Image (cartoon, rainbow, N blue to C red):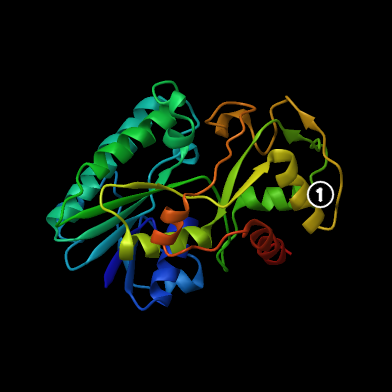
Amino acid sequence: MKVIVIGGSGLIGGDAALELQSQGHEVTIMSRKRPEAPALAALPWVQGDYINDDLADGRLQGFDAMVFAAAADIRNVPQDGSVDPAEFYRQANDIAVPRAFEAARDAGIRSAVYIGSFYSQVAPHRVGECPYVTSRHNTDQAIRAMSTDSFRVVSLDCPFVLGHIDGTQVDYIAAVVAYARGQLEGVPVFAPKGGTNHISSRSVAQAVAGALANGEGGKAYLVGDENLTWKEYLELWFRLAGNPQEIEVRKDDHPLFPDAIMFAGPGATVSYEVDPADHEALGSFDRQQIEPTIKRILAAYS
């Protein structure tokens, strides 16, 4: 199958592209800039900005399937105050993402997988309260409503995703590594209240392949792996980094895990188990992968 991965230069889209390639699919990456990771740079590449470009110009023709891993989140919002976050999310997600799916449908693509967010399923009270959660909810509803017998759309609602692709380095992950190793001078060691579900990008990639093969059109699958309190999560990082310690929990805003990214609410605990039937339908993606993933990251950021 010929598959185009929009957002394939990033972690989630990149791992999905590599997983699909490993299964024998012909994979092309679409992104604003060429991928930096050698394994991704070796794949065919098409320049594309789904927000500002007209993807109905023919660049999506010839593909059988699409994976969309490029919806906007807090990292993409201009931090200079020039744009209202709610309006930014509306333009980048509510409007631009469905427009990209319409272009894919009209280009003859028959199957599409959307990488969504778990918040509208695990924290539905935040829909209408939080601009980001509201936007991801609206986007998910809009693209799944397009699903038909001739254009199958499947959504994967993901929790916090952790991973690494060789040849890349992410500043935020580098900061977490340094924090766990005790190398961030002056940064207090503590954990936020609450916790969440986590999943590795490799597990998401396996779920993407399963969704393309067997996913039910119009369905949003809640995926995930391990439920960890932030205390458990950080103590795991510190232990694996060779700096084990008991970490106290505080109400303070955490420098690396601030309230601004806790979209279920500061101090909230989001815990759930994946439906066994959904896990099987998505190819039984790997579980218990957070510790192995942290080990890989620590080795890569040596």
- Res. 79 in view: yes
* Residue 20 location, quadrant: bottom left
Residue 88 falls left or right of residue 251? left
Q: x%, y% of residue 163?
A: 58, 58
Q: Nearer the viewer, residue 34 or 288?
A: 288
Q: Is residue 25 above or below residue 144?
A: below
Q: x%, y% of residue 230?
A: 69, 39
Disc 1 element = loop
* Residue 301 location, quadrant: bottom right
Q: Quadrant of the N terminus?
A: bottom left
* Residue 98 location, quadrant: top left
Q: Is residue 248 above or below residue 63?
A: above
Residue depicted at 17% across the width and 68% down the height: 62
Residue 63 falls left or right of residue 89? left
- Amino acid type, mark 1: Gln
Residue 173 falls left or right of residue 217? right
Residue depicted at 69% across the width and 48% down the height: 175
